Amino acid sequence: MAAAQLIVQLEVRVCQVPAGATAVQVEQNQSNNPGQGQSQLLITMPIDQFKYFQDAEQVYGTAGAVTLAQIKTALDAASTTLAGASGTPLITPTILAEINAWQTGSP
């Protein structure tokens, strides 16, 4: 049987938070919601406006001897796929305009 290769799967949500929100309005750690752990900064809870993106990238390296740097390279590639300055990123100018319009009440 051949050695298994690795991929990283990245799920990203760009979320709107209420205007004037403070650390009192923090989110809880719940299903599929990171919340705050002991080493995380307080983050105000998002409201209903969000965009969801996902990507998967291969981790290049020797099976069974993958390095942290090789995993980071795959994560960097996923970041570029999502919002890179070159190629065809998933966050397009049109989607960015929609995200920016949330502040004026646009869905």
Image (cartoon, rainbow, N blue to C red):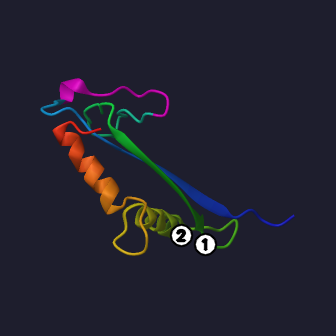
Is 38 part of what is drawn in magenta? no
Q: Residue at x 23, y 25 (%)?
A: 25
Point out the stretch of residues depicted in magenta.
23-32
Asked if 99 appears above or below 82 in the picture, the reply is above
Q: Quadrant of the N terminus?
A: bottom right
Q: Please state which of residues 15 and 1 is positioned toward the viewer in this rendering.
A: 15
Please, what is the three-letter code of the amino acid marked with disc 2?
Gln
Q: Quadrant of the C terminus?
A: top left
Asked if 26 appears above or below 49 in the picture, the reply is above
Instruction: Give the dominant element type of the magenta stretch: helix, strand or loop.
Output: loop
Q: Please state which of residues 39 and 41 is positioned toward the viewer in this rendering.
A: 41
What is the crowding at mark 1: few (fewer than 14 residues within 10 Å), some, or many (at least 20)? some
Q: Residue at x 60, y 66 (%)?
A: 58
Lower position in the chain sequence, tag 2 or tag 1 = 1
Answer yes or no: do the residues labelled 2 and 1 have beta carbons within 8 Å?
yes
Element under disc 2: helix
Measuring from the top left, give residue 103's x and y in whole percent: 18, 41
Q: Please state which of residues 93 and 23 is positioned toward the viewer in this rendering.
A: 93
Q: Please give left or right for residue 88 compared with residue 56 in the image.
A: left
* Residue corresponding to mark 1: 60
Residue 88 - label: none
Please, what is the three-letter code of the amino acid marked with disc 1?
Tyr
Q: Quadrant of residue 35?
A: top left
Measuring from the top left, give residue 44's x and y in whole percent: 25, 33
Q: Quadrant of residue 66?
A: bottom right
Q: Residue at x 29, y 49 (%)?
A: 98
* Residue corresponding to mark 2: 70
Q: Please give left or right for residue 56 compared with residue 27 in the image.
A: right
Element under disc 1: loop
Asked if 19 appears above or below 78 in the picture, the reply is above
Q: Please state which of residues 67 and 24 is positioned toward the viewer in this rendering.
A: 24
Measuring from the top left, give residue 50's x and y in whole percent: 35, 40
